Image: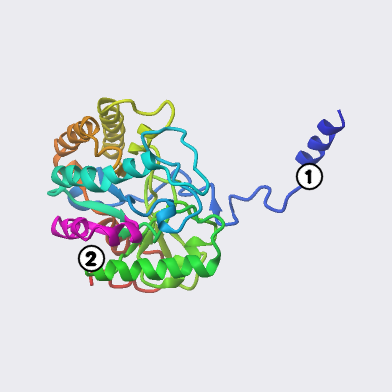
Amino acid sequence: FDIVLCQAAKMSTWHPNDGKGQYGGRDVVGYEGKPPHPKWPNGAKVALNFVLNYEEGAENCLLHGDMESEKLLSEMVGAGALEGQRHANMESLYDYGSRAGFWRLHDLLKTVPVTVYGVGMAMERNPAACRAMVQAGWEVASHGYRWWDYQNVDEATEREHIRRTVQIHKDLIGVRPVGMYQGKPNINTRKYVVEEGGFLYDSDAYDDDLPYWNTDYGSKPHLIIPYTLSENDMKFASPNGFSHGGEFSRYLKDSLKYLVEEGQRGAPKMMTVGLHCRLVGRPGRAAGLAEFLEYAKSFGDDVWICRRDEIAKHWYKNHYPEGYGRAPNVDH
């Protein structure tokens, strides 16, 4: 009974953030149900972006200097990390992504605009894959230097990792990344990304169907292009997720159809499809992705298949916020 009273007392305590819609970097209000018309090219109703996460070779592994093995996003759903030990099966499942899955997806998507979320350490291990990304005309955004959880990584290390991965992109891709998706950030990651000075946008957010501006850091607005954990093949590696490529394709089709219909009613949106080499790179799952790709193409100009940097440049040119002067030149 005393515990219940204590909990009730805590619940009734006033907090300085009570009643606020924007607080501590959060914004639960957003566009208030009145988002801007994005004015996508050619009158498109949806901007569709495929994101290919390239992570294999940067996951937790004793061979990488880590204290435990990887545990996330593999065929072994619910696997635990092995502290102080290598996990032979986990390593092999990740290696499938870079050895086979990447090349299957590259063959499927090489004529399609794609954004790669490239982890720096993984990119360094496979220059041939990096060359293939460039030859396909894909954007390669930064997915950090390591495929780590950065929640408790100290500031100096995280800033150094950002600097280091930018240099890796310059060396292997030929240009620096203009987008960042740390993936498992902490509440200070965006500050470090903005202060690095060279990123047009970051995607460490899941809170909207359109890009939006953040003005919490410095004198210039920073663009957020939200990512997704919903239209994402990671559900192949989660309980009660997708069981085969047909389910993946059906869910993506339903999502795109609904968004196109919203756009036809005057409210165009953005849709992201998240992919992983070791997951949807398996043939039965890739078949579902191929089916969805043909469906998306069938909409013609109503669906703008594009890269995230193209979305960013479009937003800078058409939706730069008032009060911050002229929009910067983003074409270089």
Q: Is residue 252 visible?
A: yes
Q: Residue at x 27, y 35 (%)?
A: 256
Membership of 196 in magenta stretch: no
Count of number-bearing discs: 2
Q: Which residue lies at the image location 35% right of the left edge and 73% below the top edge?
A: 326
Neighbour class for label 1 at 10 Å: few (<14), some, many (≥20)?
few
Main SS of the magenta segment?
Answer: helix
Based on the picture, tell me whether residue 133 belongs to the magenta stretch. Answer: yes
- Image mark for residue 173: 2
* Vertical placement of residue 144 versus 11, above or below: below
Q: Residue 252: which numbered mark, if any?
A: none
| Residue projecting furthest to the right | 2
Mark 2 crowd level (few <14, some 14–19, many ≥20, 10 Å Cα): many
Element carrying mark 2:
loop
SS for tag 1?
loop
Task: From the viewer's side, name the closer residue of 9 and 35.
Answer: 9
Classify the position of the N terminus by image quarter: top right
Marks 1 and 2, how far apart in space? 53 Å
Q: Position of residue 316 (x, y in %)?
A: 32, 63
State which tag comes first along the sequence, 1 or 2. 1
Q: Position of residue 109 (x, y in %)?
A: 17, 45
Task: Point out the frontmost of discs 1 and 2.
Answer: 2
Instruction: Identify the disc placed on residue 13.
Output: 1
Q: Front-most of 196 and 97?
A: 97
Mark 1 touches mark 2? (CB < 8 Å):
no
What's the residue type where badge 2 is placed?
A: Ile
State which region is magenta.
Answer: 118-140
Whole-percent x, y for residue 37 in the image = 32, 49
Q: Quadrant of the C terminus?
A: bottom left
Would residue 59 be found to the left or right of residue 133 on screen? right
